[in-house]
Amino acid sequence: MLMSTYSYDQLYKFTHDVLLKIGCPEVHAQIGAEVLVSADLRGVDSHGVARLSGYIRLWEKGRINPNPNIRIIHESPSTAVVNGDSGLGLVVAPYAMNVAIEKATKAGTGWVSVKNSNHYGIAGYHAMMALDHDMIGLSFTNASPLVSPTFSKERLLGTNPIAVAIPANEEPPFVADMATTTAANGKLEILQRKGMETPTGWVQDKQGKPTTSANGVKEGGALLPLGGDREHGSHKGYALGAVVDIFSAVLSGANYGPWVPPFVAFLDPDPNPVGEGIGHFFGAMRVDAFRPADEFKSHMDNWIRRFRSAETTEGNEKVLIPGDPERELEEVRRKEGIPLLKPVIDDLTDLGKKLGIDF
């Protein structure tokens, strides 16, 4: 499929200008653009500028407040609940993660649950905010109900990602960022643009039968928990997704399970919500609250180097550390640019015309 390459600065400026156009304050437009385009830089194309028109669609429906009063509504020395005031999750999440970091600076650890927010981009961005402070960062969010629990045909959970960022010394940080489903919905959208099918184990149809249709979820089917089926451990993916949902929403007062307001265009919000908006959960742990930071990071270097040197199976060159593929791709894309598929380019071009901004 045809594609073209754009620089980070080009995509950042366009995203920034679009967010300004819908009424975001300058600082929010800057943060939102940085979070969104960071996904493209790291190769998580499903959560980058391809999602921009989705945020604008929610704004047009009155579901996103471009100038929110994001605030702490309950707190203890090491915990807080943040109300995102229906703001862009791209902006609400960094605010909440900064609260967690501030709490950890004083108390050793900080834990923040968020309600009344929206889709927050890639989970890893927010977890990685802790790294510059010699802290371990955690980032969870619930999401559009597109996932069926093991043995169910109903869509009750989201892709509910988990991200953990851990600092090292001379080695790059350990950054795990993953959905609790076999694949994120954005991966289906990429396959739809390419006219390709999914691998087996990603999706079931509306009867609960396996399918490889990239449109299977739109046609009434569901994404599958990590593992795909019971024999391959889908009950574990289901449990992980449930933990994220509870930490993000039951704990904060956001909507949970099938009541989560969907980001996707083919679903409407439940008319009888059980909470406010979608929910996130963030954690920051000061390393020196456990052991001296330099000592810990030295041992993280040792951990990483030992795993990198592991004997590989036939046909594989090396063992990867979580975060390696994204970091390596970011280095390439900063130099060579970010490739966008033609359907994404067309979508952004149309969005720009609608708002009076050149793409």
Image (cartoon, helix red, strand yellow):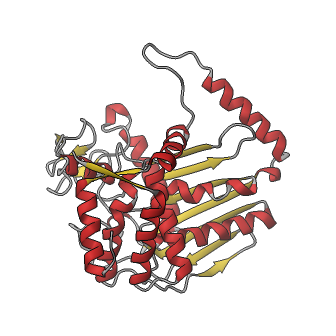
Seen at 31% across and 69% down, the residue is 54
Name above or below for residue 295 compared with residue 341. above
- 3, 196: nearer the viewer: 3
Where residue 5 appears, as percent x and y from the top left, is 36, 51
For image coordinates 40% across by 70% down, the residue present is: 14
Q: Nearer the viewer, residue 147 or 39?
A: 39
Q: Quadrant of the C terminus?
A: bottom left
Q: Is residue 264 left or right of residue 12?
A: left
Residue in the image at 65% along x and 40% along y: 172
Residue 269 visible in this rendered orientation of the protein: no
Indicate left or right for 308 with 143 as reference.
right
Q: Position of residue 105 (x, y in %)?
A: 78, 64
In which quarter of the view is residue 354 placed?
bottom left
Give the total of numbered labels.
0
Q: Nearer the viewer, residue 35 or 202?
A: 35
Can you give x and y, in whole percent of width and height, for residue 251 in the image?
A: 53, 68
Res. 299 in view: yes
Query: For the view shown, which residue lies furthest in the top direction?
Result: 314
Q: Is residue 287 left or right of residue 79?
A: right
Q: Quadrant location of the N terminus?
A: top left
* Quarter of the rendering containing residue 320: top right
In depth, the one of 257 and 163 nearer the eye is: 163
